[in-house]
Image (cartoon, helix red, strand yellow):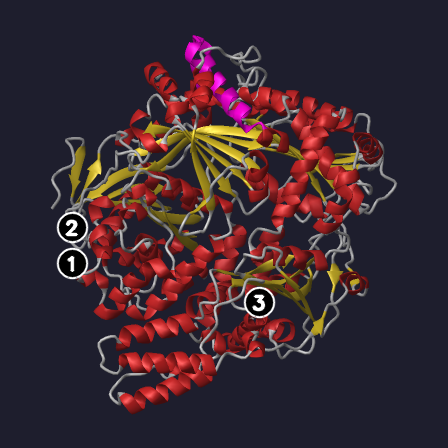
Amino acid sequence: MQPQPHPEWERIRPSKSSVPPFYAFAREIKRSEQDDRQYRVIQLDNGLQVTLVHDSKADKAAASLDVAVGHLNDPDDMPGLAHFCEHLLFMGTEQFPRENEYSEYLAKNNGASNAYTSTSNTNYYFSVSTHALSGALERFASFFHSPLFDSSCTSRELNAVDSEHRKNHQADLWRIFQVNKHLSKPGHVWSKFGSGNRDSLTKAARVLKLNQRPLREDPVNKSPIPSQYCASRMRLCIIGKESLDELSELASSLFSPVLNRGRDPLPMIEDHPFGENEKGTLVSVQTVMAFHAMEISFPLEYQPPFWRQKPIDFISHFVGHEGPGSLHSYLKNKHWVSSLSTGQQNLARGFAMFKITIHLTSEGFKNYRSVILAAHKYLALLRSSVFEPFHQREQATIFSTHFRFIEKKRPDNYATWITEHMAWPVPRELLLAGPQLILDEGKHKVREYLESFRVRESRVVLMAKAEEHAKVQPECRWEREPWYGTEYSVQKFDEAFITEAESPKSLPEFFLPGPNEFIPTNLDVEKKEPLKRPHLIRETPLSALWHKKDDKFWAPKANVIIDIRSPLGNASARASVLTRLYSDIVKDSLTEFAYDADLAGLSYSFSPHSMGLYVSMNGYNDKMSVLVRHVLEKVKGLVVDPQRLAVIKDQAQRDWQNFFMGHSYSISDYYGRYLMAAQQWTIEEKLAELPSVTAEEIQRHMKDLLSQVKLRILVVGNMFKDEAIGIAEMAEEGLGVSPTADLNEKALIMPAGSNFVWSSPLPNPNQANSALTYYLHFGSVVNQRLRVVSSLLTQILTEPTFNVLRTKEQLGYIVLCSNWSLPGASEKGLRIVVQSEKPPPYLEKRVEAFLDSMRFKIEDMSIEEFQGQKEGLEKKWMEADKNLYDEAGRYMLQINSGHWDFLRNEDDAGLLKSITKEEMLEIFMSHVHPSSITRSKLSVHLVSQKPRPKKISMAAAQGFEALLRTTIPEIEIDNNISTADIEDRPTVFDFVDHWKERLESIEAGDTLLAALSDLVEKYPVDAELESSGGLGGTSIQNIKAFKAGLTISVDPGPMVQWGDLPVPRF
């Protein structure tokens, strides 16, 4: 038994003798005035602390368990072991041995789960319908006291970890992160390779296979996995509808069996990875994507102990400011940067960084040394400045206002946030408030940190493609990071540069920000009776205004969304480019004005879409009208600066080019949507238009576009009708009416009985993963019964898709199954996505085999299971909005589509009750099953150009098996290898490596291995077999011709006429 935590903790002995006693924190947990939930913190006798959250209004429950160990605790010879453990933990328990028991239970109860391994912690979490919380917790808890760690899962989960690593292999974020770790001082744990791959984890996998027993039963350090998972290192949060007493008993009953192994509850690493040799350096890194960026980092002590003052937030406020006199403003006026951000980065429990991240223009990259100097000159200004009282007061006010009116979020996100912060050294009564409020001044720490933020103490990471580095640093000598192969170069800053940077003289353009006029002062909220939907309160030839006064959240906030539709916004590829550049220039010109508003909790966005532009504003409504007016004035009165246009064109070009260097499945999805869109321009078409665009042309395009518009406006939140009408009138000023009434997107519909395949090589030659997007068309959403049945069918298919194609068949890390709404939202279908090192034809073959097997699963489904699936979908549809932003987004989907079907979820949930299994099976057989002669199917194959490791051929495997049986009759042989499908066979390397290990102690081993090498040489895999053969279907050779041959969808228009307006429309 753990000792009593503190006098403020009370011993609780539940009335049920089966529930172990525990301690409860006696003081009240400080919460936001807006928060109607109840909280309690308890500690079990095994040392595990639990935060319990009772939410009487919840329709979704959740839990998160955080273990205070991460990949920095990995053994030196097994990098990635903590991550590997995270994967293996989900593979069954003694109480629930079936591998997918947990995921299947969650899926049919409107739930989901995930986990992540960080440097100092590993977090597991789930969400589920409230009625199913106890069952989910029972399954969840058993992972931590009786996991199977079944050796039969080892190979598959090793593949999953390796596939996850390969997914990230071409991602610059991961590559640069590992370079920074690699360049730690010698022997520091920060240098470890955290995600792991097949090579790094081979030893761990062998340990598991050799043990042939659950790792939890192995306490004498035969494996390090179980001994690190100790109850006193765990922090749990449970959110549910049950009372606090019921939640307490659930937690104690289910989690008391978790063992306390006497480990340090919060292992700290206080030694910083930057030693003297690592500081005062410029690290140049070659990127995969085309961009220019810089990170200036300074070593920092662990920040949670300073939760009362938050000194780094105070410094970040100034260094990251974007208003007049700021570092950002200075660099932007030089045309050197496109964005700048700052903040702390808690690298691990014990050490951190203060980081300035700057995205550079091409000109800024050439002047990177001047950019570094400017940053240090701004830090010199801060060192020499006397901060005014209003600076501290404003930040404290912003934090306290945010905390007072904080809105609910997804319960699994909230539970995870709580468990992460339970590790902070914050009194339990301030568990929620402490991390979110500024309670004391931190001027001494601010001064201490500013004094340490100097060139000699810093590391600057300069990022760009190799050819860009060659232009500015031709003398670089490149080295290679071992795990990702990223090339980098390290140089010490010269003394002349350091002297210049350390000079106390600041630049005359720099000065501190003044008072923030956007901080809200009127925070009153008037409550009213709830409505189920927004009402159309004003309609003119130019606009339609929908309004709903907040009646749920009682926060002084509002969302204003103005959808500017125009037939000219996307009329051609060039028009699409002009619209994109126009929106980017507007945002660029508003940076200084809008920054204070954003700090004060009032933000805006302006972005293009396929039928025009969105303007949206959200946040505190007190100063909303000021922001709306200023943004709209800029939208209508923009004067294009040719110099800024050059910067923005360069950024657009890089964005579009970089898209093709991203994840393979994102590219296959992009082409899938393009093939099904009636009017969409490819990135290649846009790139061809971009170079010749001029400032004058954008100016003309803006004028023409705004002369032909139709506005769809939504105002939701703490604003009255007259305020909403004022915004609509403001929006209409100076605009012209579109002569075209039909401004909705259209989709393309494939004919019944069609089977199309489009294939293309991936642009990134180093991308090892291919991708498949597999689309099956259901039909129009106007058909409510089809809409509902197809949604139920998709839900039933989703969990087995993941379980079969990813968990069992190990096709790849990314496996997705979902509804897919086509452009215009009037047509829908089913989408299955797989990203894999295996070729797309093989992936498609496995998808079709899976769909074939699902016929029998659906046919054999019991009435009880079918009813459970319906109830899970009903709960999903009836799930309440968590905050104002979610509510506005739901309404805007119906306004954007023009359907106005605001109560669709409620109506569909009602119809769902009458749906039969026979109906669903009929839709499955006619629209989904591969044997259907009426289904409409499109598959997109994005094919990796990177050569794949060769598989062992059937002839070579069979020949070697025969030789083994002759030479060593008693040896055990896996007969599945020689008979398996080619994609399920090991690579030549793995096959040889396996037998090298098996035969190393056998006298004839060397002779046999030599014979194996001869067999591999004699019987190579046929290149045609490597692609697994072709599939039936019509290959799309000409995309334009293919799209021209399809039927354009019919726009159903408003699907509900609400009759809100008491007078004629116009």
Q: As rendered, which of 812 and 532 lies closer to the eye? A: 812
Label 3 element class: loop
Q: Earlier in the sequence, mark 3 or mark 2?
A: 2
Numbered range of the magenta stretch: 367-395
Q: Earlier in the sequence, mark 1 or mark 2?
A: 1
- Say which residue label 3 marks: 915
Asked if residue 786 is positioned above or below residue 397 in the image, the reply reads below
Determine which quarter of the picture holds residue 579: top right
The reply to whether callout 1 and callout 2 are in contact (CB within 8 Å) is yes
- Say which residue label 1 marks: 219
C-alpha span from label 3 to label 2: 52 Å
Label 2 element class: loop
Placement of the C terminus among the 4 image quadrants: top right
Q: Nearer the viewer, mark 1 or mark 2?
A: 1
State the image coordinates of residue 707 (x, y, percent, origin top left): 85, 33
Task: Please name the amino acid that badge 2 sits on.
Answer: Arg
State the image coordinates of residue 744 (x, y, percent, origin top left): 76, 48
Residue at the spot 36% in from the left edge and 74% down from the top edge: 992
Q: Neighbour class for label 2 at 10 Å: few (<14), some, many (≥20)?
A: some
State the image coordinates of residue 6 (x, y, percent, origin top left): 16, 33
Asked if residue 164 is positioned above or below residue 414 in the image, the reply reads below
- Say which residue label 2 marks: 261
Task: Please name the amino acid that badge 1 sits on.
Answer: Pro
Magenta span: predominant SS is: helix
